[in-house]
Image (cartoon, rainbow, N blue to C red):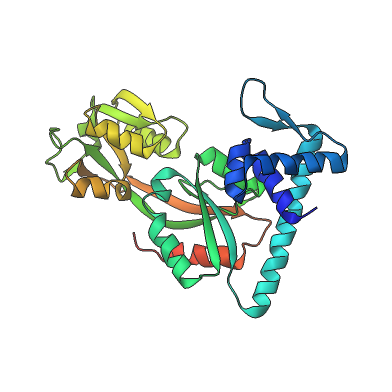
Amino acid sequence: MQIETLKIFCDLAETQSFSQAAERNFVTQSAVSQQVRGLEERFKRRLLERVRGRREVRLTDAGQAFYEESRNVLAAYAQLQERLRALEGNVGGTVRVATVYSIGLHELPPAVRRFMALYPSAKIDLEYSRTTRIVRDVLSGAVELGVLAYPEKRRGLDVVLLPGDRLVLICPPSHPLASRRQVRAAELQGQDFVLFERDIPTRRATDRILKSHGVTVRRVAEFDNIETIKRAVEVGFGSAIVPRPSVIDEQNRGQLAVVALAGPEWTRSVGIIHRSDRQPTAAARKFIELLQGSDK
């Protein structure tokens, strides 16, 4: 049994998808199936169950135990590689990072490119997810780092704060507020709004700020994706409150009007989370240092 087999199994357990596990490991879906069958034959246990009528799979009790111990083996193997690289003074290996779309698409790419230029033997494996899934994946060890908005301290996690983002109002160029340089929260009363879904931290923060000002907006639509929100505003659904870095391109192209929001409370905190019981690898530490020094 090879270490790659354990990684494939863990990726399958985490994604619940043969196709995604295959993509992560640059193999075919049939190769993933063969690896799983080999494990089940070796340990004489059924590790996975297919969900009837769907393409998903779920772990059996034996599969869950195998997954948890396999993650420990993979972590130990990564630590072994890390120590050997440290003896030579090398920064290498793969740093698995999960992030939300608004940060991953609009803020991390320059940092990733710079990291790859500085440390060509290292690699950043970047994936996009919702905040709740990112926290779960960091705690389980599926990813090493999570980069998200409004990070919260919780048991088992350390938080490294990064420079925050200003939240701004976006609206179509024809909107009455489009020509304004700045608006106050009170001026948003009764406006049509496209919002993030309720479980997304930026939405919760926006609701909290508006409520503190006694402002109620008219909810026209809710989406979980920053790109969908921007498109909805472009076609006239309403206005939205989003992080400034995510709309620079649309502003430059004249697709959206971007208006500053008055008050210090309209700042979105951003941070990195990692497991508190594990020292980040050298490559992960270098990436954290690079993000801490980035200029937004």
Q: Nearer the viewer, residue 181 or 61?
A: 61
> Is residue 240 visible in this depiction of the protein?
yes
Pick out the residue farthest to the bottom.
Answer: 88
Farthest top residue?
53
Q: Report x, y in % for residue 19.
A: 59, 38
**Where residue 65 sits in the image (x, y, percent)?**
79, 40
Residue 259, quarter of picture: top left
Q: Image check: 211 left or right of 140?
A: left
Residue occupying image coordinates x 31% and y 29%: 194
The residue lying toward the viewer, choosing from 184 and 180, is 180
- Residue 39 versus residue 208 in the image, above or below: below
User: How many numbered marks appear?
Assistant: 0
Q: Is residue 131 above or below residue 120?
A: above
| Viewer can see residue 261 | no
Q: Residue at x 70, y 73 (%)?
A: 84
User: Does residue 108 appear to the left or right of 123 in the view shown?
Assistant: left
Q: Position of residue 17 (x, y in %)?
A: 61, 36
Nearer to me, 42 or 162:
42
Decide which of 238, 2 is in the foreground and name it: 2
Left or right of 198 in this view: 123: right
**Residue 48 horizontal/vertical position (percent):** 74, 33
Please report the residue visible at 48 percent of the width from the left and 53 percent of the height from the top. Answer: 271
Based on the displayed image, in which of its 4 quarters is residue 78 positioned?
Answer: bottom right
Extreme residue in the right direction: 44
Image quadrant where one finds the C terminus = bottom left
> Would residue 200 appear left or right of 175 to someone viewing this image?
right
